[in-house]
Every structure is written in structure tokens, then in C-alpha cells.
Amino acid sequence: MQLTIWTYEGPPHVGAMRVATGMTDVHYVLHAPQGDTYADLLFTMIERRDHRPPVTYTTFQAQDLGGDTAGLVKEAVRAAWERFRPQAMLVGASCTAELIQDDPGGLAATLDLPIPVVPLELPAYQRKENWGASETFYQLVRAMALPHAPPPGTERATVRERCEAEGRRPTCNLLGATALGFRHRDDVTEVTRLLEALGVEVRLVAPMHSSPNDLAGMGEADFNVVLYPEIGGQAATWLERTFRQPSVRTVPIGIGATRDFVREVAAVAGLDEEASLAIVDRKLPSRLPWWSRSVDSTYLTDKRVFIFGDATHAVAAARVAREELGFQVVGLGCYNREFAREVRTAAKAIGIEPLITDDYLEVEDAIREAAPELVLGTQMERHIAKRLGLFCTVISAPVHVQDFPARYSPQMGPEGANVIFDSWVHPLMMGLEEHLLGMFQDDFEFANDRGPSHLHSEAPPAAPTVAPAPVVATPPLMAADATAVADAAAHPAASPGDSQAAIPAAAVATAATVASPEGAPGSASDNGPTWAAEAEQELKKIPFFVRGKVRRNTEAFASERDISAITVDVMYDAKAHFGNR
Amino acid sequence: MTPPTAAPDFETGTPAAAASAAAPSAGCRDLPVLRERGQREVFCGLTGIIWLHRKMQDAFFLIVGSRTCAHLMQSAAGVMIFAEPRFGTAIIDERDLAGMADVHAELDRVVKRLLDRRPDIRTLFLVGSCPSEVIKLDLSKAAERLDGIHAPDCRVLAYSGSGIETTFTQGEDTCLQALVPRMPSTADAGASGDTASRDTASGDTASGDAEGSVPTSLLVVGTLADVVEDQMRRIFDALGMGPVHFFPPRRSAELPPVGPGTRILLAQPWVNETIHALEGRGARRLEAPFPLGVEGTLAWFQAAAEAWGIDAARVLEATAAARERGERSVERHREVLEGKRIFFFPDSQIELPLARFLARELGMVPVEVGMPYLHRAHMEQEMDLLEQGLLGEDFVLSEGQDVERQLDRCREVRPDLTVCGLGLANPLEALGLTTKWAIELVFTPIQGFEQAGDLAELFARPLRRHAALATLPLATPPQGTPHLPSPTQIPGTQRAPGASAPVEA
């Protein structure tokens, strides 16, 4: 039993819905009680879809449990067939129906519908949304394409041989895009554009935009491009095995990865690598390289970023952050354990500890600990960053309605790199502004915790970063974060969890620590060095966006040297020791 | 009024009455009810936690359920709540399903950790879900055990919000019902409300007319916004009646007293079982329409005043200024709403009182009023006020849901305004229909004189918006349209993504 408030992933049947909703001419009958229809609004509201997801829910009630829930399944399948006439049907159970073991797939099979009926076994008590999407897509591909598979052992000519023999361009399928995916809509367009420029024809995009009958012909393409390994990887592996159809697995997020992608496509499709790269440079140049090299971007150097998301987006972001923007990656992690290995490898290369967890409170603690200047994460991290007064850009699902922009906004390919440059750099302090703030921080307009002027009154940053960073005494569980603890201590009557109440209260708690250097019970000063009042004053002269970093560095510096009281001198010793990092 | 075609699933509420031709001024009480059974596009009772945890600020709601429950809670309100919420989900996993003893031990562990972290919590609700009901996890027993451990600092109660037993707002009903036995008896009302409650609960069943014939306190049942409570309290004070208590209270540890002298007014239509439990403790329900709109609110206050023997003229006098303001602010929206046909999909249970308000005070024309279930006893006055002469041709009063068939009806009649859940709103808008999110009617202060205009505005706004955007093309973009800047013309995918099969809305 796991205690959860917010979850990164929904249950696996929501993954199945993402596949079905992205496709056409398929219908999903879900054995589920009243209330599970909430999932419809993910699509109609968050993604602003103009159609309901193609899902029929059996809606069984307590009174049905002793009776004929199996009958309900059959009735629902039959009614869905009559009304929607899909090319194929998916039949499965949600968490509750799994417990009553009606075998919806078997029941549907007894109806002898004239279409393929694919039973889905998605164990709701073990697995999650991405797994559910991957499994559903794989099962559907398998059901539709297997009848067209060559006999086992059949050799397949290389792409080049196939194209030359038939006098045509190479063709491919794009795998993994679904409904409700982070920028899937635009990534598909961008990668299609990129491939077309290389002379490769995209035959099919799946599951998004395809019908079950389209899936039947998947084996005809020369190769597959796996855009989202979490969802399309399993099907691609099966296609490799069954059709000997090669896959391109590089995910083209960022300039370097896009170039690697082009190289891999060239190798698989039998194209000239250098010529292909040259085509992309000429036809689809990205502005990121020059924007990043231009001197205005110097201030981006070594900005501390914390990255968390699904493994694919997190690993890609780490590369872009380091190699293309000159950031320093201070945290890297993912919530999907199935792909943890990729994240571990990437973290090791950077020399940091990977964070593999689906407990957002653990992520919150890690972010507080790392004191980054920018968080790249999911909508969960957006909320965490808001609470901590940090800036955040979303780079991965789960996402909310504002992450489905009206404008074209891919993450992949050349245009994706442009989008990344803008959306990651925009929240940061502009170069000159940063200097002015540093020099004239006593200016009343800068005073006390102003956010960057171009972000209006968005951020109330000071309090949380000022709050004692390592709240070691508190087990990293649910509910209280540092500010809430401070809140409870300072204002027992205030409603905990109310961030508006918590922020001033945290400031009060900090002030109390300054006043009595011994520190209140539970404050950081129990465990670490204490700050002399004049050092604390000096700290306040440092712009808020580096203050947390300076405090953290200084405390670490003092602890290592067994210095118990931090004076102004200790502070500047620490500054000299760490340099500007 | 002729009922819609006499399908076999039509049942008449009171067959004898239905047979007689209804007079134009008769209420809709005798109309046949279309009872449907099929896919329901309605939330389960867990969703009530979204407002209950804000209303009772010292309570925590721990759902014992699945990942789906947790996912529902973060999706249902359509928002992520920034602050740390006072609810969470204990997610049952595979290991728990292996053996029951294990589940209880796990639950004890989770609760202990939770309460250690949140010493400010005074009431912990263990909330049953579909999975916990199906595996027959006895949460009442668990609550009893945990209450023994954590009381008096934190009381532990259990109720069910499962979708197999409750629909949306019914979750509040089951929650409040669980609190009723803990309410102190009015006999001990002098004592502190918090401590007196527990053991006296059984002693004060209805004990004869003599004892209960004089009202001693008023209990308003159903969650209201704090601002609405305060307004109502001022009017009760002006009438010189009381004491008045609201249930649920703002602090769960301060439950109002109940006993034979207690008179109940329903603030919300979904507290039916709670009322039953309160009646079991001697309280009596006052018959009244719901306090929506000027007329409904006045009748609601009048019902209370009458029980206290207060002159009707005095009620009119005490409410005159508020009524005048209310009428003026309602009237402002008449131009937009009058004569417009309105269709309600079932959602919260508040549909019938809303239809009454919109028909009587704004001249809207209900064409279908769907409700998750119809509690006739508590809807009697509403049904009488919703006169048949105000209803649209082929008016349908429906209970339960088969969403596909209901959508068929909605597309067929093409109402001017459709009140529906979030899962249906955009698909209906895409068909050119104008919709109002039903959930807003539960999360917004709409009761009382001062909110009557706001309530009207909630319905007027989508229509005003529809009119304001008249020049915009209706076409919705196909999902994933390749609409790209050059340099190269962007090739589409093999098939036009928008050219999907004609799926029903």
C-alpha cells in the first residue's frame, strides 16, 4: 500500500485510451464502474479534443456484482459495434473490473463480431499508464499485422536494395505518438518534414492518425522510426523480429540528437550521411546554435538546472542543457522505472546521482536540496517549482492544458531546438538585468525579492530558498514540506498546505532563526553551522536567485571544516573556495 | 404535455395521476420519468472530497483505492491544486491483494505515518472506493480500530465514495451520514460540542411529539460556501430565530448538536441519507424548495420562519432589501436567457431546482432535465413549482443515464444551452451547441439572494460568448494538423489526420 497525493502516471487503461483516442476507426470497451469516465475529460478538456474518446464503459454498479456483470460486457460490446462500426475493437478491464475477473476479452470473443477483437490484459495493480499504452499498441499491431508477416526465417533485402528494385524512395513508419502526449502532435509534423527533406517518405504515423487497417500494412514500410520508446519501442521490436524491419531509435530532441538521428536514418535507409546532414543544414537550419553562441547567451553559462520527466525526455534534455546551452545539470531523474537504465547511464556520464522515483515529494526534496536556477520537468515539477519560488519549463508528460499550445511548438528536429531555446531561456534572468541586480541591489525597485521584470509579478522567490534547505529531521513523506513545517511551527492555527499562508510564515521562522542563533527545534541549525547575524545580513545583499546557492555552499564549506558559526569572513572564504559555481 | 413516445422503459411516478390529463398549471410531479440504464458520464462519490476537504479544514480524507482513484482526484476538478491538499490515496497493490490481514496492517502503518506528519488533523476519513468495496475491505472496522488508537486527538471515521455505490455528490451524503452518530445530542448542548458527542448518540431517538413539538434549533444541511452561510446567518438573526447550525461545519471537531427539537433545512439536494439519519435522531425536515434564485430562497426562509411561528410579513420585511437586489441582478440576464431552450445532462442532483429557477425567474424553457437519481420526497416542492406550462414540447424528465441515447436526444432537439460534464462539453460545442459546465454549479456560491444574479450569469455567459464569437468559423482543427511554416511545404501524413471516421460526438 503506497500513500500518494499526485501521480505521474495514470492507470494502464488510460494508456490504452491514449492509443485508442489517437487512432481512428477503433473502439475500446472498458469494463468499469461509474466514475471511471472521468478519463474522458483528460482528452476533451486538457487536449481540447472535439470528440469524445472512442470508449464505452460498462458502468456496473454494486447491485450488479452478485448478478450478471458478464452480461453487461457483452451488451456493451454489441451496442458499441452496432453504433460505431469500428475496424477493430479493444476490450479490457479497469482496476475494479480486474478484481471481479469477468474476462471481458473472452466474453467479447463469444459474440463472433466480423472484426478483430483484441483482448487487453493490463494489470492495474502492477503497471501504469505508459506501460498500458505500449502494451495496447503492441497488441493491436500484432493482431493486425501478423496475418501479413512473412514466414519465419525469410530474409529481407536492405532498404537500398528494396528501393532500387522498385525504383522508389525509402519509406518509413513513425511509431509511438498518441493522444495526450507532450507535443506529439507537432513532433510528428516536424519529423515528417525532416524525413521528407532527406527524401524519405512517411507511410504511416501510428498509433496517432492511423486506423487498424493501416496497421495491417505496417510491414511494407522499409523501416520504423521510434519517436517515443516508452510507447512505440515494444511494437518496433516485434516488427524487427517478425518482419525484419529495421528501426531508427535515436530520439531527435536537440541539435546533436537531431544530427545523430539524421546519421542513423542515412545508415538504415542507405543514404549518404554527409549529404544528408548537408541537406538538413541547408533546408532546415535551426537558430539554436547561433543563438547559443551569441555573446548575449554568455550569462547562461553554468546555470544550474534540475531535470525530471519521462526517461526519454529527461535524457534528451540533459544533453541539450549541457552541450547546447552550456548549463550545469545538477539533478536528473525519471518516474518510469522501466526506462531507468537510460537515465542511470546519462547521470553517470554527468557524474551525478540519478533520481528514479514516482513519489513527487521525493522529487521536491531533491530539487530543494539541489537549489537549481531552473527546473525542467513535468507539470508536477511546475507546481514544486512554484512552491519553491523557482522557474520551471515543462519538458515531459504529464502535462496540462497550457502545454497544448495553439501555435506550432514541437520538441523534436530543427524547429524543436528553436522552441527549446526560447522556452528554457525565457524564464531566466536576462544578462544585463542580472548584473544590475547584483550591483544595485539596494535600489528600492530591486529590493527584497523582486522577480525578473520581464516575468511581471510571477515569482515570489525569496522565502522558500531562504528557508533552511536540508530539513533533515523530517522524513520525506507526504504533506508537510519545509515551508509547511515552518508554518505549523510558527502558526499552529493556520491551515497547513495553504501556500499563501506558508510563505510569510516561513519568512517569520527564518527571522526567528536569525534572532536566536541556537535555532528553534527542528530548524537546520540543529544539524549544521549557525549564521551570525551580520553574515545573515550580508547574505541578504546577494540577489535572491543565487542566495540559496551561496547559503548552501557556505554551509557545506563550514561543515567540512568544522566551523560552527558562519561569519562574514567564512562566507567570503567559501565564495573564494567555490568560485562562481 | 404529452410524454415522449411511450417506450417500454418509461415508468410513471404515480400511475393514477399520470393517467389524468395534467392541467397546464400542474407541477411536473406526475410526469412520467424516463429511467435509463447504460453508460454513465458522471463522477463517482470520491469527487466530493474536492470541496469537503476545503470546507472542513481540520479533516483529512484518505481514499483506500487504486491508482485510478488517485488519478481521478488530480484530474476531476480540472485543476491541480497548488497547495498540499488534505486528501490522499492509499493505493492498494498486488501484495495487498494477496491477503487481507496484510491490508489492515498496511493501512495502520499508512495512517500512523500520515497522522505523525499532520498532527493538526482532527478527523480522518477512510474513504472506500470501488476496489476496496469489491475486495470487501471493511473500512468501518478499520476506522473503529484506528479510532481506538488515535482518539481523542484524531477521530477516525469511514464512508464510501465508490462509484459502484455513489454518484458524484452522493459522496458528500455518505460522508455526512458517517458524522451523524458523532453529533452531540441537543440534550447536552450546553456541554462542549466536541466531547459530548460520542456516547450519547444512541440515547436520543425521537421521543414523542411533546418533546419535539417546539423547535429548539435549526440545522442547515449540505455544504455551502462560507460567504453564503454568513449571509444566511444574518437573515436568521434578523428574524430572531435560532440557534442556527450548518452541517458540515467548518471544523469537523465542532459538530452541531441534534435532537427532537432540531429542524432541518436542506441546502443541497444530495444529502438524502444524511437527512434520514438525522431524522433517526429525532430531527424533523422542513419542507421547502432549495435556496436557488430569489423565489426559492424566500420560500426556504419562509419555511424556517413558519416553524418558529414567525409572521410571513416579517420575513418579507427582513429580506426586502436582499430580494430587491437579487431580483434586479437576475433581471439583468433575462434578455439573454428568456425563451432559450435548456437541456440538463445528469450530474450533481441540482438539475431540477436549477430548471425551476431558470424557468420561473428567467423564462428559460427546459427540454430535458436529467438527474442521476430522483429523490421524490425531497424534490416534491421543486416538482410542484416546475409547472408543466413552463416546459418545452416533448419535455423529458430522466433519471439515470445511457449517455449515447441521451446524446442522440440532445443532438435531435439542439437546445440553446446544454448543461453537462466536462467530458461532453467540448464535443457538443464542436457540433455548434452551447454548453455550460455542470461542475461549476457545485463549486461556485450560487445559493441565496445575493448570489441569484451570479447564478443567472453562469448560464448567460456561454450564450453571450457564443454571440460575441459569431463571426469565428466553427471548424475545429483536426488533431495534429500539419500546418507549418515553410521553407518547404510540409507533407502531411499518409492520411489526412482530420479525416477520421464520423464518430459520434
Image (cartoon, coloured by chain):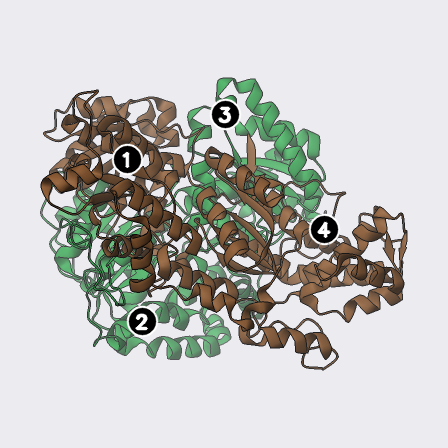
Chain colours: A brown, B green
Amino acid of disc 4? Val
What residue is at 28 percent from the left and 48 percent from the top? A272
Crowdedness of circle 3 by 10 Å Cα count: few (<14), some, many (20+)? Answer: some
Q: In terms of image quadrants, where is residue A139?
A: top left
Q: Residues at badges 2 and 4 in contact (C-beta under 8 Å)?
A: no
1 vs 3, front mark: 1
**Residue B137 - label:** 3
**Local SS, label 1:** loop
The chain letter under disc 3 is B
What residue would you read off at disc 4?
A: A485
What residue is at 22 percent from the left and 29 percent from the top? A243
Across and down, in percent, residue B323 comes to 43, 75
Across and down, in percent, residue A107 comes to 22, 23
Across and down, in percent, residue B438 comes to 35, 57
What residue would you read off at disc 1?
A: A246
Q: Nearer the viewer, residue B51 or B109?
A: B109
The chain letter under disc 4 is A
Crowdedness of circle 1 by 10 Å Cα count: few (<14), some, many (20+)? Answer: many
Across and down, in percent, residue A188 comes to 29, 52
Q: Determine the CA span between mark 1 and mark 2.
A: 58 Å
What residue is at 56 percent from the left and 69 percent from the top? A458
> Are discs 1 and 3 both within one chain?
no
Quadrant of the image containing the N terminus of chain A? top right
**Residue B274 - label:** none
What residue would you read off at disc 2?
A: B460
1 vs 4, front mark: 1
Q: Determine the CA span between mark 1 and mark 4.
A: 55 Å
Quadrant of the image containing the C terminus of chain A? bottom right
